[in-house]
Amino acid sequence: DSADFDREVESICPFCGVGCQISLKIKDDKVKYVEGINGPANEGRLCVKGRFGFDYIHHDHRLTKPLIRREDAPAKGLNVDPANWQEFFREATWDEALDFAAKGLMDIGGTGVAGFGSAKCTNEEAYLFQKMIRQGFGHNNVDHCTRLCHASSVAALMENVGSGAVTATFNEIENADVAIAIGCNPIENHPVAATYFKQFTKRGGKLIVMDPRGQALKRFSSHMLQFRPGTDVSMLNAIMHVIVEEELYDKQYIEAYTENWEAEKAHLKDFTPEKMAEVCGIDAETLRDVARTFAGANAAMIFWGMGVSQHIHGTDNSRCLISLALMTGQLGRSGAGLHPLRGQNNVQGASDAGLIPMFLPDYQSVMNDGVRSAFTDVWKSGDFSSEKGLTVTEIMDAVHDGDIKGMYVLGENPAMSDPDVEHARDALAKLEHLVVQDIFITETANYADVILPASAFAEKSGTVTNTNRQVQMGRPAVPPPGEAREDWWIEVELAKRLGLGWNYQSPADVFAEMKLNMKSLDNITWERLERENAVTYPSLSPEDPGQAIVFADGFPRPDGRARFTPASIIAPDDVPDAQYPMILTTGRQLEHWHTGSMTRRSKVLDGLEPEANCSLHPSTLRKLGVTAGEHVRLSTKRGSIEIMAREDRAVSPDMVFLPFAYVEAAANILTNPAVDPYGKIPEFKFSAVKVEAV
Ligand code: SF4
């Protein structure tokens, strides 16, 4: 009923990488409700987060003024709750807070300062953030949560197909007849994408689900491979072994578009399904059937998520998936392709915009002199380091080593999201100067010297890029509370105080500058996005809505050829033993988003899922003498938490599933910081754990 609102504004859902387009219904400068509109990724659909998860915007915990830590404040890291913040911080004017923030960073200077940007901010804000660290401090120690998400997938994709983005939109599943969904749980984590998966199966499409948890997609699957955690490479190599053995591969495609096939073929020889069945726990006949089903498809897609990427062998897992698509010629055609489902609403865009320590915007290497000078020409500044910068977890280690003393954290919450989080929290406490820019006093802000109050998605303009490579326009619908400001404005004001001479008047100015060195944005202008809401990159002309499928005629690699990179079995880092006999895996739940700072302040979402919980198999609960709803203690080599246990047949008897959104039972107290050597992504999906009744 239009009487319920006095304005409506079109924007983008702030949660997952699906990037649903929404209409915010506004009355008296408050969001009253949200509806889905006809975006290219959602066609009017929304999940429960997009539909009901907006009221955190108006929560009374919102930061409304800049805060500076009091000189007589208690120790850093103590919980600053909304009732007692005055004990820790005092209000400041913007000028005072910005001067203080900039001076603290400049006094440390150079490689002593690092930056964590955000996959929740806009493309323009991500671009400005990486520019500030590179231009202002002369190095590349700038990263964001892609490191904890798909960094290993991107490493494998860059290496083997020459581009880190998806090769086909998820909507292309409409044109497929077979699809693999591995290490992802789209019904909970990409719910609107999952609706397309369900439609695909209704039309007769075969969905092969591979996951150590028997997740909800199982009901729609033709094959459910509930393999042992951490054994992806053995299972995928066995499937590829069958394709080679039975000569089901696409010879013409391999000859025309790939390299290193003979090495891959030779490597796969040893991975017989019979041998690998003992490793991965899937019987040989099922592995053979899956190989024949996938290789026999007219058009097939592969989707994957954090279950693939968050391992010390995450890059190898993705290498296998890429090889599987290449050997069957399932790329560059309608209904065929590789699609790592992106987590955050703008993790694709923030990565594209250069918020990564090894790449400038558009994945151009910081080590390339020509690339750096193309950027410094535009920035009108001197050269910066040609060395790759430190990643999220390396930055925390460098703080412990005394090499990094100052940090600027924009919209990230490493005090909750980093593996072995006590190590990260200790690092934050050691910093001489921590600038936190956020909308709430997060767990990370508990350590801040200065807090800059920022804006929520519905309070600012800027573009974001979803999992489908669709660049979409976000619009301001309501004013930020009190003196909170748009993130790009805060970045510009801080940069001015760092002496960088920035003079952007709007996000549109920033976008115009981004286009100068980002070919991916060719034919995509701010005006066009204002008009059309979304354009997929690459877009081949000002009229082209963008290419849903890429690499029809070869790859952005030497000779246009994609590469097979063989992968061997590497055991998880922290294997179960007598003291820690079970396997812990962490992840998300439908109702909550990441570290919970937004969704746990949303009435409906918190109402639906109000309590920290973990999932255990009924037989495990029985053995422990625990009834569902009672508490258990989970302990790893890093620490212990107590948490309510749920009965869940989807997890195997030797496994615990633990969501990471709950501060009162923070999953990352338990997780292992060991990283994949290529993507530098931690092994969130596998830790040895002990479970006890309390
Ligand atoms: Fe938002 Fe993702 Fe849900 Fe769409 S599927 S409404 S983008 S959380």
Image (spheres, rainbow, N blue to C red):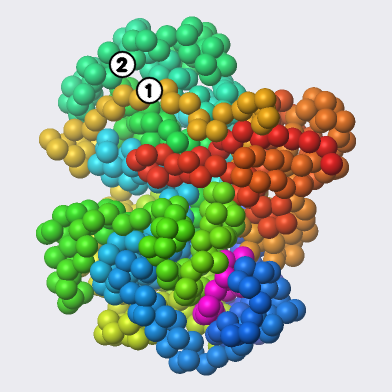
Q: Which residue is drawn at 27% across and 13% down?
A: 266
Q: Element type at marker 2?
A: helix
Frontmost residue, 543 versus 252 = 252
Q: Residues within 10 Å of mark 2 (few under 14, many from 20)?
A: some
Q: In this picture, which residue range is highlighted in magenta?
A: 439-454
Q: Which residue is drawn at 38% across and 43% down?
A: 679
- Lower position in the chain sequence, tag 1 or tag 2: 2
| Circle 1/circle 2 CB separation < 8 Å | yes
Q: Can residue 406 be seen in this view?
A: yes
In this image, 541 relative to 428: left or right?
left
Query: How far across and down, in percent of the image, does residue 272 sit?
Result: 42, 9
Q: Name the residue under label 1.
A: 568
Examine the image and state in which quarter residue 456 appears.
bottom right
Please tell me whether residue 434 is drawn above or below residue 352 in the rendered image.
below
Q: Is mark 1 within 8 Å of ligand 1?
A: no
Mark drawn on residue 682: none
Q: Does the magenta-highlighted stretch encompass residue 93?
A: no
Frontmost residue, 583 versus 296 = 583
Mark drawn on residue 267: 2
Give the residue type that dot 1 points to.
Ser
> What's the distance in space between the residues labelled 1 and 2, CA to CA?
9 Å
Q: Which residue is drawn at 26% across and 59% down?
A: 360
In this image, 432 relative to 75: left or right?
left
**The C terminus sits in image quarter:** top right
Q: Element type at marker 1?
A: loop
Examine the image and state in which quarter residue 382 appears.
bottom left
Q: Residue at x 28, y 84 (%)?
A: 499
Give the residue type that dot 2 points to.
His
Q: Does the magenta-highlighted stretch encompass residue 442?
A: yes
Query: How far across and down, in percent of the image, does residue 643 sit?
Result: 77, 47
Query: How far across and down, in percent of the image, does residue 117 sit?
Result: 43, 65
Frontmost residue, 14 versus 20 = 14
